[in-house]
Each structure stands twice: as structure tokens, then as C-alpha cells.
């Protein structure tokens, strides 16, 4: 009998995942990951992991499977929290959920599960796994969940072939309504529990308070950039023309002559496309963050959600921050003469897929070698530090950290 260790979060999805695996004849062990031990920045009155671990334990008791709590708070701080602080300090906006899956659930957690003799680890993600034989070698694919409203493939875009070989996603073929119905049929305590929000396996966190634990408050200028300024107009012309050259996807607003309209508490606390938290009124249209300069400690803003400086024709991924989920397809995907390859991408969770093409940039074409993702239509608020996931049909083939 194959042994599976399920990452039980205390939610309905992982609860049903454990139940389904048990029904399929696996020997199932439930493991709850404790990733956080600081309640000073959580928004709940009580530390959420306690309630979640209790719910996970109750489900394990209902299913009659072994259960234990695994304290990963130390390695989570090192690999995720410290990474987040470093990224914000450098002016980038990280995605901790993508990193949590790569570094915690399918690395540290996987290693701990294998110590328990596990053949696989499983989670309650709405995503599917495929496998096929290519030249005598098994190749795994990461596919979108069938429930398009809950598809979480984006969050797993950094998994590699080994991690996929050890992963099971029992609910990827189901709709959320079907998952709820199964939980209610089994009378699981999590059947009507609301979906969790916030950082991966932590819960809701007050991000400003969280960041201020290590990032200092530092007053700087807020510069308003007119949508008719020469630099903005030139950028918009290039974005609309589809002409993509080095840096044309990222407007250099620090070279724009704008008007100081307020002060802020630190450029590292803001991100491109942000509207809330500026606390600046008296304008005909809402203000949005167009860009930040952490070195000069300046943020640039503009009026209206359709300000031209918010849009980009494409993005760049540095070679050392690029990842091929399907290395076997790299040559074919980069072959610009292959008309059968039609790619799509998203730059944030739940964003509609947009057509794109992917090309490699050699060292010397840019400061760093890497890959350029060019959109069929301009996208708004492309944010450095976030991840781009590139799809061929229903599977992710490539991903990477957005550099600019």
C-alpha cells in the first residue's frame, strides 16, 4: 500500500483531499504545518494556526488517520519571511505563496514526509498533474484545475519535475461545490468553513505592521506624473505599437519632471498599481502608484486607473530567476518558426490569461541574460518581484520572477 502524507491546513479542501486518498486505497497520514509563531501582526484576536490545527486534527480523527503538527516556523522565517523583507527593501513586491509552495510544502515538508516513509505528498490545491512517456522517460505536467474559478496552478508555477513526481492533487478534477458536498456528506467539521485568506499557512496579516518590524519608516516625496508628459506619451506609443526593445516595458519615471504633491513614509511600503494607503485627496480621479524608487525614496503617482504609465508591452525575467516546468519543451517553445506553439500568461492569481510569446535574450542584449515575455495586448501594473506563469494549452511550461 502506497503511503501519502497530506498537508492538512484545517480547511475543507485539504480535508476532502485526505478523504479521497483514503477512499482510493492509500495509507494516509495528516500533517499540519505550523509556519508562524508571532501573533503580534495577525489580524485575528487569537493566533489562527491554533484553530486551524485543531480543525485538521478533528478531521483526521473522523477519518481515522494518524495526525501530527510539524513546526516549520524557523525555516519559514528564513526562506519566506526574510526573503519578503529583502524584496520589499529592494523595491520589489514578492509573492510569498508561490515561494511557500516551492520552498516549504514541496521541499522541507516533502523531505519530512519522506522521512515518514511517504511515497507521495498531497495538498488541497485545485490543480491537476499529468504524466507521459517521452523517449523512455516519465515527464510530468502541471495543469490547471477544472474549476476555473478556483484554479491554483499559478501558485505552483515554480515546481520542478522531481517535486511533481512526488505530488498528488486529489481535488484538481473537482468543482468547489463538489468538494463542499463531499465534506458535508462525510459530516466533516470543515464542511462549511470559509476559505482562508492571507499569507500561506499563516492567515491574515497586517502587512504594514509586518513590514515595519524590519523596514524603517523614512519620509520621502510623492511625485505626480501627468499623463501628457513627453516620457509617458513616448512610453504609451511604444506599448501600443507592439515594438518591444530593451526596457520599453518599464517606464523610467525617475527621469520625469513631475510635481511634488505630498510625502510618504517609505518607498519600500508601496507597490506598482497600488491605490489604497496613499491618503492623498483633492484630485479629480483616484491616484495610483506608477512606480517606486527605493534608492531615492520617491514614489510616482498618476490620476486614474487607465494612466498610460501603468501599462506594459511585456516583461523581463532574468536567467537566474527563470524556471522551466517542462524543460523538454524549451527548444520547441523558443522556436519562433513553430506556428503550432501558442502561449498564454498571467502575472497574478485569478488574472485572465493573455496571449504572449517568449523569447530568450542572450547575455549582452541586456544587463543580465534572460527571457522576454511579450503580451498580445498591454497589461496593467506589471510588478517586479511577482511571478509570471506561461501556459501552453492548459499546463504551465515556464515561470519566473518579473524583473521589470
Image (spheres, rainbow, N blue to C red):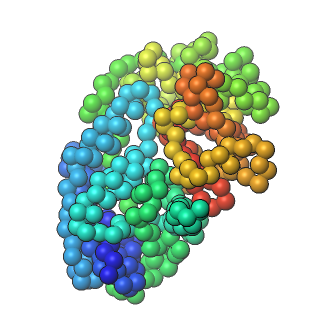
Q: How many marks?
A: 0
Residue 126 in view in this figure: yes
The relative height of residue 356 versus residue 151 in the rendered view (above or below) is above
- Please give the name of the residue rendered at 32% of the width and 47% of the height, measured from the top-left corner: 205
Among all residues in the image, which is located at the extreme bottom? 185
Give the x, y percent position of residue 216. Answer: 30, 24
Give the x, y percent position of residue 6. Answer: 32, 69
In-image side of 197 versus 385 (left or right): left
- Please give the name of the residue rendered at 53% of the width and 62% of the height, measured from the top-left corner: 137
Tell which of 323 and 236 is nearer to you. Answer: 323
| Quadrant of the image occupied by residue 49 | bottom left
User: If the image is split into quadrants, where does the C terminus sit?
Assistant: top right
- Please give the name of the residue rendered at 30% of the width and 79% of the height, measured from the top-left corner: 27
Tell which of 143 and 354 is nearer to you. Answer: 143
Tell which of 224 and 70 is nearer to you. Answer: 70
The relative height of residue 244 versus residue 135 in the rendered view (above or below) is above
The relative height of residue 345 versus residue 393 in the rendered view (above or below) is above
Give the x, y percent position of residue 278. Answer: 47, 31
In-image side of 388 versus 48 (left or right): right
- Please give the name of the residue rendered at 29% of the width and 53% of the height, measured from the top-left corner: 108
User: If the image is split into quadrants, where does the N terminus sit?
Assistant: bottom left
In-image side of 300 versus 123 (left or right): right
Give the x, y percent position of residue 231. Answer: 69, 18
Residue 279 in view in this figure: no
The relative height of residue 32 versus residue 181 in the rendered view (above or below) is above
In-image side of 249 versus 121 (left or right): right
Amino acid at each position: 500500500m502506497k503511503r501519502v502524507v497530506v498537508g492538512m491546513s484545517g480547511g475543507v479542501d485539504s480535508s476532502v483531499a485526505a478523504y479521497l486518498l483514503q477512499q482510493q486505497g492509500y495509507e494516509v497520514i495528516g500533517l499540519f504545518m505550523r509556519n508562524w509563531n508571532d501573533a503580534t501582526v495577525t489580524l485575528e484576536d487569537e493566533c489562527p494556526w491554533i484553530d486551524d490545527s485543531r480543525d485538521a486534527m478533528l478531521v483526521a480523527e473522523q477519518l481515522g488517520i494518524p495526525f501530527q503538527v510539524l513546526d516549520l516556523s524557523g525555516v519559514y522565517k528564513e526562506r519566506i519571511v526574510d526573503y519578503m523583507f529583502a524584496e520589499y527593501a529592494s523595491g520589489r513586491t514578492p509573492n510569498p505563496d508561490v515561494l511557500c509552495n516551492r520552498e516549504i510544502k514541496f521541499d522541507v515538508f516533502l523531505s519530512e514526509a519522506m522521512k515518514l516513509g511517504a511515497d507521495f505528498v498531497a495538498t488541497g490545491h485545485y490543480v491537476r498533474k499529468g504524466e507521459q512517456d517521452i523517449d523512455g522517460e516519465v515527464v510530468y505536467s502541471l495543469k490547471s484545475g477544472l474549476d476555473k474559478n478556483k484554479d491554483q496552478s499559478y501558485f505552483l508555477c515554480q515546481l520542478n519535475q522531481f517535486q511533481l513526481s512526488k505530488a498528488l492533487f486529489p481535488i484538481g478534477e473537482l468543482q468547489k461545490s463538489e468538494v463542499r458536498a463531499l465534506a458535508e456528506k462525510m459530516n466533516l467539521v470543515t464542511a462549511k468553513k470559509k476559505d482562508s485568506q492571507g499569507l500561506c499557512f499563516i492567515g491574515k496579516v497586517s502587512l504594514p505592521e509586518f513590514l515595519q518590524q524590519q523596514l524603517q519608516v523614512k519620509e520621502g516625496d510623492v511625485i505626480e506624473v501627468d499623463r501628457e508628459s513627453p516620457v509617458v506619451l513616448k512610453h504609451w506609443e511604444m506599448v501600443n505599437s507592439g515594438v518591444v526593445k530593451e526596457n520599453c516595458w518599464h517606464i523610467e519615471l525617475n527621469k520625469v519632471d513631475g510635481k511634488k504633491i505630498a510625502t510618504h513614509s517609505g518607498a519600500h511600503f508601496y507597490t506598482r498599481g497600488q491605490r489604497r494607503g496613499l491618503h492623498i485627496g483633492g484630485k479629480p480621479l483616484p491616484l495610483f502608484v506608477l512606480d517606486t524608487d527605493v534608492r531615492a525614496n520617491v514614489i510616482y503617482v498618476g490620476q486614474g486607473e487607465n494612466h498610460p504609465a501603468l501599462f506594459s508591452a511585456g516583461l523581463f525575467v532574468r536567467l537566474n530567476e527563470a524556471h522551466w516546468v517542462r524543460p523538454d519543451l524549451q527548444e520547441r517553445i523558443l522556436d519562433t518558426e513553430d506556428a503550432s506553439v501558442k502561449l498564454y500568461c498571467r502575472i497574478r492569481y485569478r488574472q485572465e490569461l493573455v496571449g504572449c510569446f517568449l523569447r530568450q535574450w542572450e547575455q549582452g542584449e541586456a544587463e543580465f541574460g534572460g527571457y522576454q515575455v511579450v503580451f498580445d495586448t498591454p497589461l496593467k501594473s506589471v510588478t517586479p518581484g511577482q511571478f509570471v506563469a506561461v501556459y501552453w494549452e492548459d499546463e504551465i511550461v515556464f515561470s519566473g520572477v518579473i524583473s521589470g
